[in-house]
Image (cartoon, rainbow, N blue to C red):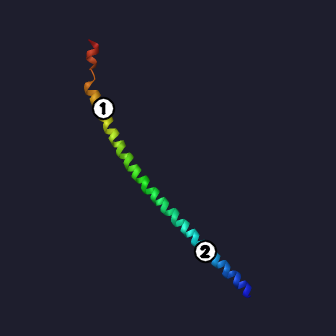
Amino acid sequence: MKEKFKRLQDTYTGTQHTNSLLGEKLHSATESLSSERKYMVQRITHLSTELEQANATVASLENINVSTAPSTEQYMN
């Protein structure tokens, strides 16, 4: 009976240790993913700003192109 109790106690202690290690690994993975998410949000914000600037440049260039383009009447004469 004492031997059975000792085996159960050893198994319980081993399980607690394994559970603790798994908890630490889970915490580490969660921290890593949180950092990665923060970086990705910052990157998306930066790229969105660049895209807005590029769209504004394109619109500006289109306005310049339209205002300086020769009219079709010039080609007909």
- Relative vertical location of residue 8 with respect to residue 53 in this rendering, above or below: below
Residue type of the residue flagged with mark 1: Leu
Residue 14: assigned label: none
- State the residue in front, 28 or 68: 28
Q: Where's residue 64, x and y in %?
A: 27, 29
Label 2, label 1: how many angstroms apart (C-alpha)?
A: 66 Å
In the picture of the structure, the residue carrying the numbered disc 2 is 17
In the picture of the structure, the residue carrying the numbered disc 1 is 61
- Relative vertical location of residue 2 with respect to residue 47 in this rendering, above or below: below
- Relative vertical location of residue 19 with respect to residue 51 in this rendering, above or below: below
Residue 15 relative to residue 40: left or right? right
Query: Residue at coordinates 41% horizontally, 53% vertically from top-left?
Result: 41
Q: Quadrant of residue 18?
A: bottom right
Proximity of marks 2 and 1: CB atoms separated by less than 8 Å: no
Which numbered disc flags the more N-terminal residue, 2 or 1? Answer: 2
- State the residue in front, 72 or 23: 23
Residue 36 relative to residue 13: left or right? left
Residue 63 relative to residue 39: left or right? left
Describe the element under mark 1 as helix, strand or loop.
helix
